[in-house]
Image: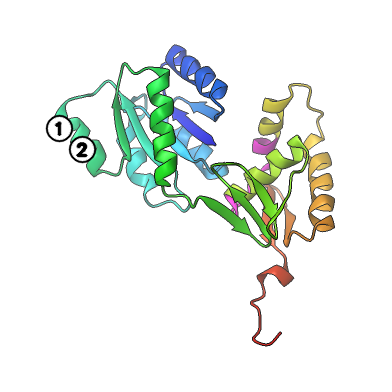
Amino acid sequence: MRVLLVEDHARLAALFQEGLRRAGWEVETVGTLAEAEASLDSVVFDVAVVDRGLPDGDGLDLVKRLRHRAHAPAALVLTARGEVAEICEGLDLGADDYMVKPISLQELVSRLNVALRRGGRTPTVLALGALALDRLSRNMTVRGQNFDPPRRERTLLEDLLRAAPRAVSKEALEARLAGLDKAVQPNAVEVYVHRLRARLASVDAGVVVQTVRGLGYRLEATAEAAEPCQPGA
């Protein structure tokens, strides 16, 4: 499960990031609305945890905009602003939950899990071609059969599937690989994309990784997978 943490207090953000990772979450932390928008443009998140008092504006502005995004994450507000009117404002503008600081890591994890169980705004199962990913269990299948590629290939594939039909920049994929292993070679993305393409073809996954020149990569359904079944075929 992937969470975007939008928090400008560096020490608090680091504490929550470390705790959430220990709890099994993949965490990306940013400190401004602009950085949050950039992250949302390149990666699909399951949940966004948003502070209100950010250097470039009120986090509720981001919460409002999330409602208009495809595959929008569940939006949780985490702030020191805890007046009843402020809480009602946040919920009315689209927040799935409103949490007032200070809050324990244990409570934050519980509220994130509740948001996931409710489903947020992103489908529980992401599917393209014959490939499917259950966001909650992270179980990946091809035509109903378990599909478990090596860790680095799986990481790239999950990012591409979550973002589809949008492209993911090469830089974003490099950062994801670096998060798994600091000793990443300069051509690591190309190497693992090449391996992933071969692996997807070997199981007839009905998807292909396309190169988007000047940007990065996009996951697309193959022509065969995209064709509707004809009656009697």
Frontmost residue, 169 versus 28: 28
Residue at the far top: name it: 11
What secondary structure is found at the residue carrying circle 2? helix
Q: Which residues are magenta?
A: 163-173
Mark 1 touches mark 2? (CB < 8 Å): yes
Characterize the local packing of mark 1: few (<14), some (14-19) or many (20 or more) Cα atoms within 10 angstroms.
few
Query: Which quarter shows the C terminus?
Result: bottom right
* Residue at left offset 43%, top offset 42%: 117
Residue receiving disc 1:
85
Amino acid at pointer 1: Ala
* Residue at left offset 71%, top offset 34%: 174
What secondary structure is found at the residue carrying circle 1? helix
Q: In the rendered structure, does residue 16 fall within the stretch colored magenta?
A: no
Residue at the far front: name it: 145
* Residue at left offset 46%, top offset 15%: 10
| Residue 68 on image: x %, y % | 38, 52
Please tell me the numbered disc located at residue 181.
none
| Residue 113 on image: x %, y % | 44, 34
Residue receiving disc 2:
89
Q: In the rendered structure, does residue 171 fall within the stretch colored magenta?
A: yes
Amino acid at pointer 2: Glu
Q: Quadrant of residue 115?
A: top left
Residue at the far left: name it: 85
| Residue 173 on image: x %, y % | 68, 38
Query: Which quarter shows the N terminus?
Result: top right
Q: Quadrant of residue 33?
A: top left
Residue 97 falls left or right of residue 124: left
Q: Is residue 142 above or below residue 117?
A: below
| Residue 160 on image: x %, y % | 65, 48
Characterize the local packing of mark 2: few (<14), some (14-19) or many (20 or more) Cα atoms within 10 angstroms.
some
